[in-house]
């Protein structure tokens, strides 16, 4: 198959979908790899490197899209990119943020088969394809470094001639991949860390990283069948906010990570809770792109309210483009190999990974989650 890697046009995006090492694997499988000129520049992969391993450098996006059977991207395609795709071609990459009627009609009009990386189910045999987890790990790491930069005190315990300085206290809300990486990174920097999560299964993981797990009446079915967080009732959320508010007031840094695929992030920290926090504290809101876990988060901005710095961080994986590109590239390559692994390269919709991740095929929406979300939106 002819695989195309366009340059990302989303503002601030530095990642590239396929790095030279993974391009080599695709070439060995008999595919052709076409890459737009300078597509890897933001992640410090040069055209020379791609050319050296046998990839074909294409001068512009229009030529690339007209040549290939498969498009692999990081950021969801914008309208002009979809319009350049060949009819009946294949798209693989992130998608959920653009899945509205207009986009779906456009992609179905061209009979594009599309796969959303964020819809890959979290099961054992898809671990090597799990781009959400890979990128969340980077976001969790960067969140702690940003917090350390904005916090007006040391993270570790410091024994100095001027006296002993106690360590910073960090609260991590949500112990998924991003949260666990935040815990591990904050602990490496010497902070005292505690974590909160609604899922009973994560307590052992939190404690194994040296953090204290905050007790609450846990919910046995807090996860969906595919391993993602469920939306909870308003009564439960009220109780959750009470606990978070009490703990946030006793910590110097709060890192929030709670997100729901395709929905607005839950509000876990109200302005009243921010007002009760210590002056000089920092909130890093990893859900800013979905509206934020903090009520007053402003996506893409650092603001100060009531003496607390609230960082509405966006696209943190792109701030570490070398490793982020390498990780994502491995994920998407493994996913592609899974999808088209037979001699006839036909899709197996009986397979859970293929079925869950496919959004459109043969001019129709084939993903139940997307179909129901669109139907629900039309009825409200």
Image (cartoon, rainbow, N blue to C red):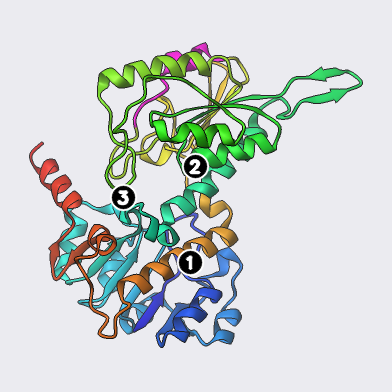
Q: Secondary structure at mark 3?
A: helix
Q: Are marks 2 and 3 in contact (CB under 8 Å)?
A: no
The mark that comes first in sequence, 1 or 3, is 3
Q: Report the side of 326 relative to 261 (left or right).
A: right
Is the residue marked by circle 3 packed among few (<14), some (14-19), or many (20+) residues within 10 Å? Answer: few
Question: Looking at the image, is 250 positioned above or below residue 377?
Answer: above
Which residue is depicted at the point 27% across and 45% down? 225
Tell me if residue 349 can be seen. Answer: yes
Quickly name the residue at label 1: 330
Quickly name the residue at label 2: 178
Is 319 in front, or is 191? 191
Q: Quadrant of residue 194?
A: top right
- Position of the N terminus by quadrant: bottom left
Q: Report the side of 116 relative to 161 (left or right).
A: left
Quickly name the residue at label 3: 97
Task: Please provide percent x and percent y for residue 303.
Answer: 52, 28
Which residue is depicted at the point 17% across and 71% down? 111
Label drawn at residue 53? none
Bounds of the magenta segment: 266-277
Which residue is depicted at the point 12% across and 41% down? 376
């Amino acid at each position: 198959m002819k695989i195309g890697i366009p340059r990302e046009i989303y503002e601030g995006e530095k990642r590239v979908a396929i790095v030279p090492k993974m391009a080599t694997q695709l070439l060995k499988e008999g595919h052709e790899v076409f890459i737009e000129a300078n597509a890897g520049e933001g992640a410090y992969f040069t055209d020379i490197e791609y050319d050296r391993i046998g990839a074909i450098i294409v001068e512009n996006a229009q030529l690339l899209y007209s040549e290939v059977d498969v498009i692999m991207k990081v950021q969801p395609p914008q309208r002009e990119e979809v319009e350049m795709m060949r009819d009946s071609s294949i798209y693989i990459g992130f998608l959920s943020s653009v899945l509205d009627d207009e986009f779906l009609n456009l992609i179905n009009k061209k009979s594009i088969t599309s796969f959303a990386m964020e819809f890959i189910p979290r099961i054992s045999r898809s671990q090597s394809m799990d781009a959400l987890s890979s990128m969340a790990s980077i976001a969790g790491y960067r969140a702690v470094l940003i917090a350390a930069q904005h916090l007006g005190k040391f993270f570790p315990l410091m024994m100095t001639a001027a006296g002993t300085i106690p360590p910073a206290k960090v609260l991590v809300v949500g112990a998924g991949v991003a949260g666990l990486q935040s815990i591990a990174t904050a602990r490496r920097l010497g902070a005292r860390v505690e974590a909160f999560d609604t899922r009973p299964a994560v307590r052992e993981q939190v404690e194994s990283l040296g953090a204290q797990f905050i007790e609450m009446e846990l919910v046995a079915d807090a996860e969906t069948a595919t391993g993602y967080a469920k939306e909870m009732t308003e009564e439960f959320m009220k109780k959750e906010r009470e606990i978070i508010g009490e703990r946030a007031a006793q910590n110097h840094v709060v890192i929030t990570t709670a997100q729901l695929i395709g929905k607005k992030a839950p509000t876990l920290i109200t302005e009243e809770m921010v007002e009760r926090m210590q002056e000089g504290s920092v909130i890093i809101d990893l859900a800013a792109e979905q509206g934020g876990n903090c009520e007053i988060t402003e996506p893409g901005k650092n603001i100060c309210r009531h003496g607390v710095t609230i960082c509405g961080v966006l696209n943190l994986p792109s701030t570490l483009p070398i490793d982020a590109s390498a990780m994502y590239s491995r994920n998407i390559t493994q996913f592609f190999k899974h999808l088209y692994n037979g001699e006839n390269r036909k899709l197996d919709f009986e397979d859970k990974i293929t079925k869950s991740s496919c959004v459109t095929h043969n001019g129709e929406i084939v993903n139940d989650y997307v179909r129901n979300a669109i139907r629900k939106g039309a009825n409200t």
